[in-house]
Structures are given as C-alpha cells and as structure tokens.
Image (cartoon, rainbow, N blue to C red):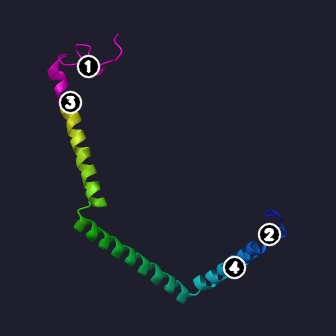
Amino acid sequence: MASDPGGEGKGLGGVLFEAGTRLVARAAGKVLSDPRGQEAVARAVGLAQRGRRRAEEVQERLMAAAGIPGRQDYQELAKQLARIKRKARDLARKLEPEQGGRGPDASGQGGEGAGGESP
C-alpha cells in the first residue's frame, strides 16, 4: 500500500510522480546553486511582480470606467466610518451628563423595545 516503506504497493503513477519530483528537486538545486540561475530566477520573479502590478492597474481602470469602487475606495470609506463612529461615541459621552437621567433610559422603557421583558 501507500505506507509500504519499499514502495511496492504504489502504482505506476505514484512511482513516476516520485521520480519526477526527485528530478525536479535536483534540477532546481543545480539552477539555484549557479549565479546565472539565481539571476534568471530573480528576473522571472521581477517580471511576474511587474506583470501583476500592471494587471492590477488595468483592473482598477476598468472598474473605474464601469463605476465599480476599488479596494482603495473601500479602505477610505472604512476609515471615514471609523472616524464617524468615534465622533458619535464622543458626542454621546458628552450628552450623557447633560441629560441628567432624562431620556428613554430614565423611564425604564429605553433599550428594550416592544415585547421586551419588563422588570
């Protein structure tokens, strides 16, 4: 079976997969041990990163043309919402002392709503 240490229970596909994996690992090791190979990998990574950035730019332009907000728009809105929430909490704290017990909570009916339990 697959847990056989000798690998006798593996099918032809499993044996080929393992052999291919070993060959690829050996080839990758040789490429990365050579400075030219390292440079080639670095160039490939750089190209991939530039390609990804370019694709994101095109996507942003298409989304803007279609009127769909982008990620940055959502992030800006989230920041604005956080600021508004903070200001609302600050205002609520300032109003509490001024109300002096007057308001919906002072009558015992606030916060429960219709159908809520009564004390």
In the rendered structure, which disc, 4 or 1, sits on the residue that comes first in sequence? 4
Badge 4 local density, few (<14 within 10 Å), some, or many (20+)? few
Determine the main secondary structure of the stretch shown in magenta. loop
Name the residue carrying label 3. 92
* Chain part drawn in magenta: 94-119
Left or right side of 51 for 32: right
Nearer to us: label 3 or label 2: 2
Q: Position of residue 104 (x, y in %)?
A: 21, 19
Q: Give the spatial CA distance, label 3 vs label 2.
A: 70 Å
Name the residue carrying label 1. 110
Q: Give the spatial CA distance, label 1 vs label 2.
A: 71 Å
Q: Position of residue 106 (x, y in %)?
A: 22, 15
Q: Give the spatial CA distance, label 4 vs label 1.
A: 71 Å
Q: Give the spatial CA distance, label 3 vs label 4.
A: 67 Å
| 118, above or below 80, in the image | above
Displayed quadrant of residue 98:
top left
Name the residue carrying label 2. 10
Q: Give the spatial CA distance, label 1 vs label 3.
A: 15 Å
Badge 3 local density, few (<14 within 10 Å), some, or many (20+)? few
Q: Give the spatial CA distance, label 2 vs label 4.
A: 15 Å
Give amino acid for label 3.
Ala
Nearer to us: label 1 or label 2: 2
Nearer to us: label 3 or label 4: 4
Name the residue carrying label 4. 20
Secondary element under disc 3, as helix, strand or loop, is: helix
